[in-house]
Amino acid sequence: MEKSRCKWCNIKNDLYIKYHDEEWCRENFNEGYLYEILILEMFQAGLSWECVLNKREDFRKAFDNFDIDKVLKYDGEKVQELLKNEKIIRNKLKIMATINNTKIFKEIQSEFGSFYNYLRTFTKDKTVYELGKTTSELSDRISKDLQKRNMKFVGSTIIYSYLQAIGVIYSHEKGCFLYKEN
């Protein structure tokens, strides 16, 4: 018998099922993961997560496996290479924002010891259990702070999705086999 999942999960897409079942809303505070998901969520702006997820492996290849130190060194030539890569989302503003946001991500790591420590100043190590939202007071505060630091494509909705992806916000729907309350 097929497991019941959140309504948004396209059960015809194996990548989406795997993401829903094994990754979404599960705590993962590894710095590399936090960086990768932040970049992918940025690229989602105006698009569906399924679109980005389907291109995830191509994004990994195009962005040097999300190696922060390599992305920091991207220049105009690399930007042109990315703009010609038909396997990823070729939005110049998002590509430029990736390079910009990488510098800020690294600055935050230096300031707080890790990006996760930065997030903890907002989350206080608590998991939030809520359904049916796309923004919250928490995502508003983090979004505003990141924007103040000059990050791009980090509006409250993107940050809310990010917090769900990394397991700070737990939003599996009632009826989903992964649903739980705090």
Image (tube, rainbow, N blue to C red):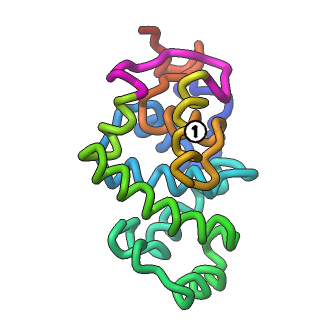
Quadrant of the rendered structure where residue 85 is? Answer: bottom right
User: Looking at the picture, how far across and down is residue 124, in whole percent?
Assistant: 35, 21
What residue is shown at x 60% (from left), y 70% (from top)? Answer: 95
What residue is shown at x 65% (from left), y 42% (from top)? Answer: 155
Question: Could you say which is closer to the camera, residue 177 or residue 89?
Answer: 89
Q: Which residues are magenta?
A: 122-136
Residue furthest left as drawn = 113
Note whether 153 is above or below 171 in the view shown.
below
State which quarter of the image contains the C terminus. top left
Note whether 164 is above or below 96 in the view shown.
above
Count neighbours of disc 1 (C-alpha within 10 A) and say few if under 14, some if 14 to 19, many if 20 or more.
many
User: Looking at the picture, how far across and down is residue 70, in whole percent?
Assistant: 36, 75
User: Looking at the picture, how far across and down is residue 41, in whole percent?
Assistant: 57, 50
SS category of the residue bearing label 1: helix
Left or right of 177: which side holds 47? right
Residue 35 lies in the magenta-colored region: no
Left or right of 51: which side holds 162? left
Residue furthest top as drawn = 182
Question: Could you say which is closer to the camera, residue 4 or residue 169?
Answer: 169
Dominant SS in magenta? loop
What residue is shown at x 61% (from left), y 17% (from top)? Answer: 131
